[in-house]
Structure formats: C-alpha cells, structure tokens
Amino acid sequence: MMALATQLRCLVCQNQTIADSHADLAVDLRQEIREMMLRGMSDAQIRHYMTERYGDFVLYKPPFKSSTWLLWLGPPLLLLLALAALFLTLRRRQRASPDAFDPDPPDDGREPGNAG
C-alpha cells in the first residue's frame, strides 16, 4: 500500500506524496487505497481509478504524453537555453577589445570641453 501511496501526489500539499503528507485528504486517500487493495484491485487498477477521478496531476510522475510533454522537456530546454546564452555571452566578451573592460575615467565634476 505504501509503495503505491508514494506514486500518488497529495492534492492539498502538491509537493508531497500521499504517503508523506499528513493532510486529511491524504489520510483519506491512503485509507481508500487500503480498502481497494482489500477488495482485490491491482496497483494498475487503483492508479487508473485515481487518474480517472483526479486527472494525471495525482500521479507524482505523470506519463509522457501530449498534455504533459512540457513538464518533461521544459527543464532540460531551459537549461540548454541558459547554457547557450552563457556561451554566447562569453564568446562576445572574448571578442571584445581590451579597452571595453577598462574602467571609466573618474568624474571630477567638470563639464566636457571645459578646462576649468
């Protein structure tokens, strides 16, 4: 029962499984799983029942399909974009002249062209 409960998300906490959560709904879902197992339902049947009732969101690891592809591919794509931006920034800095990195002359309060 606990192995199956670690595969299902607490709908109240959302960042915990129902095995880890102490929310009332998680306690109720654990009890419901226990009862379904006593009736002879398999893990696959219980997961199917939960996803029919609560949607794929209840699964702690949602399946890869058209409605969840962004969940699976989003983080690696963002990492690749960040690495590409870092690479381009470093290349641009490498090609810049050394003068681009010199500090600006101090501002002594005089206006340009006014010798003082």
Image (cartoon, rainbow, N blue to C red):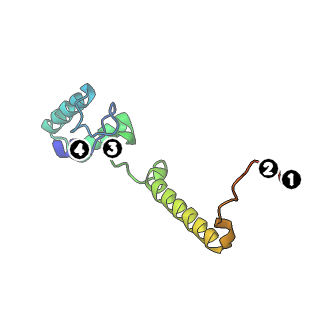
Can residue 105 be seen here? The reply is yes
SS of the residue at dot 1? loop
Q: Earlier in the sequence, mark 2 or mark 4?
A: 4
CB within 8 Å, label 2 to label 1: yes
> Disc 2 on helix, strand or loop?
loop
Q: Residue at x 47, y 57 (%)?
A: 73
Q: Are marks 3 and 4 in contact (CB under 8 Å)?
A: no
Whichever of labels 3 and 4 marks the residue nearer the N terminus, that label is 4
Label 2 sits on residue: 110
Which residue in the structure is indicated by mark 3? Answer: 59
Q: Which residue is mark 1?
A: 114
| Label ID, residue 77 | none
Residues at marks 2 and 1, CA–CA distance in whole angstroms: 7 Å
- Residue 10 in the image: x percent, y percent? 30, 35
Q: Which residue is mark 4?
A: 6
Q: Amino acid at mark 4?
A: Thr
